[in-house]
């Protein structure tokens, strides 16, 4: 009797397969076209203090799109690490990582893990941080999880604003915009997270510069980045463009900085022609060092002891970029910001928070951004 019931049930299901397939295709089509034509959005108004406003103090209306259920992409909340020497074949030299060094606690987070989880809640050097990544915008940003005396834990909301990841915190259910680091809905609307300096670079570069580093344990297999094809495509996210500034190609890579509420984009194509950039932004003197070999761009405050230094390129070494400051003649390792010889030997420049982004994503949020142009351009 049991076999007959199973047989009848199986036969019933089999007869329904064509109908189920049609339903699945219809659902997929509705989902796909709903994304493309932005049918799942609801309007929200940003805080008057939002850096995404076109005019200071004038709140901007944006649409919040729901693509997945909350935690449909699961954050990593209990990350496990292994020493660099034990990572073995699970890590390849050329793959990108986001590296942090906080109070001597050095860790690397592979991008091909972040592209699947988007948020990693961790504590490094005693500081609670969220390592966040939006593969659609190519934005890897690290934030301090401490807000108004409370340590928040972040998850993936399943929502997007202009193709960018919207996070939520599990303590208050407030929504947070990843690129802005701002609360956009809920108790923390208008509150800003504190960014933490981090370096996006290749595993080989990070490991060689920090042999003591720990790396997120990805044994069990993540393979290549599932968004690799998208990175090379002409698509601007899954929702299409939002009237991005066309000063650069939509998917041009930029290094983005925001200092004292002033945003500026440094296109990689400009950095390629000028490895060292001495600049000023938001009232601060900074230097950007770019290594095309590893695709590494890092920003430092170029003041030491109240004096601003001006840097020039000396040489490219096998694993670093050698700089000299014109004021003292000291020689510096550019990718670490450490003086290696001369009167300032042993001094270290402060690394400034910055992150990579596709131009369409950066310019959608920072409507009034400045754009760096190389001196010889």
Image (cartoon, rainbow, N blue to C red):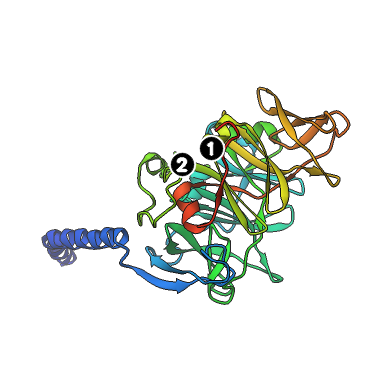
Which residue is at the far right? Answer: 343
Closer to the camera in the image, 300 or 336:
300
Under circle 2, the secondary element is: loop
Callout 1: 10 Å neighbours few (<14), some, many (20+)? many
The x and y percentages for residue 292 are: 57, 30
Vertical comparison of 350 with 337: above or below: below
Vertical comparison of 218 with 160: above or below: above
Determine the residue positioned at 45% across, 46% down. 247
Closer to the camera in the image, 328 or 200:
328
Asked if residue 252 lies left or right of residue 41, the reply is right
Vertical comparison of 246 with 127: above or below: above
Determine the residue positioned at 53% across, 37% down. 268
The x and y percentages for residue 254 are: 53, 43
Tell me which corner region of the image, top left, top right, bottom left or bottom right, holds residue 223.
Answer: top left
Callout 2: 10 Å neighbours few (<14), some, many (20+)? few
Tell me which corner region of the image, top left, top right, bottom left or bottom right, holds residue 300.
Answer: top right
Query: What's the distance in space between the residues labelled 2 and 1, CA to CA?
Result: 8 Å
Could you tell me if the residues under marks 2 and 1 are in contact, i.e. CB atoms within 8 Å? yes
Closer to the camera in the image, 246 or 157:
246
- The residue singled out by tag 2 in the image is 252
* Quarter of the rendering occupied by the C terminus: top right
- Which of the numbered marks, if any, corresponds to residue 292? none
* Quarter of the rendering occupied by the N terminus: bottom left
Asked if residue 365 lies left or right of residue 11, the reply is right
Determine the residue positioned at 74% across, 33% down. 311
- Which of the numbered marks, if any, corresponds to residue 268? 1
Q: Is residue 43 visible?
A: yes
């Amino acid at each position: 009797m049991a076999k007959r019931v199973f047989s009848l049930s199986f036969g019933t299901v089999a007869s329904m397969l064509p109908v189920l397939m049609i339903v699945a295709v219809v659902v997929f089509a509705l989902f796909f076209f709903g994304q493309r034509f932005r049918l799942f959005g609801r309007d929200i108004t940003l805080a008057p203090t939002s850096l995404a406003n076109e005019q200071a103090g004038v709140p901007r209306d944006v649409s919040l799109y729901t693509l997945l259920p909350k935690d449909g992409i699961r954050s990593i909340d209990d990350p496990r690490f292994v020493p660099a020497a034990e990572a073995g074949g699970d890590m390849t030299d050329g793959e990108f990582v986001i590296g942090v060094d906080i109070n001597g606690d050095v860790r690397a987070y592979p991008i091909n893990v972040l592209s699947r989880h988007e948020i990693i809640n961790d504590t490094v050097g005693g500081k609670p941080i969220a390592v966040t990544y939006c593969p659609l915008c190519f934005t890897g940003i690290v934030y301090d999880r401490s807000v108004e005396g409370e340590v928040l834990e972040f998850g993936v909301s399943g929502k997007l604003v202009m193709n960018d990841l919207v996070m939520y915190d599990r303590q208050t259910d407030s929504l947070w915009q990843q690129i802005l680091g701002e609360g956009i809905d809920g108790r923390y609307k208008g509150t800003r997270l504190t960014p933490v300096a981090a370096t996006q670079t290749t595993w080989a570069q990070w490991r060689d510069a920090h042999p003591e580093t720990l790396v997120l344990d990805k044994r069990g297999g993540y393979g290549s980045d599932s968004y690799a094809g998208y990175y090379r495509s002409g698509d601007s996210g899954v929702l299409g463009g939002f009237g991005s500034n066309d000063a650069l190609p939509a998917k041009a890579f930029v290094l983005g900085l925001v200092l004292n509420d002033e945003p500026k984009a440094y296109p990689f194509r400009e950095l390629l022609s000028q490895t060292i950039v001495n600049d000023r932004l938001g009232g601060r003197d900074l230097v950007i060092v770019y290594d095309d070999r590893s695709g590494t761009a890092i920003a430092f405050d170029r003041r030491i002891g109240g004096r601003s230094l001006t840097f020039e390129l000396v040489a490219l070494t096998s694993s670093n970029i050698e700089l000299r400051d014109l004021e003292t003649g000291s020689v510096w390792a550019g990718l670490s910001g450490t003086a290696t010889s001369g009167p300032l030997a042993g001094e270290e420049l402060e690394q400034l928070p910055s992150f990579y982004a596709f131009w369409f994503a950066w310019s959608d949020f920072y409507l009034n951004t400045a754009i760096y142009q190389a001196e010889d351009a």
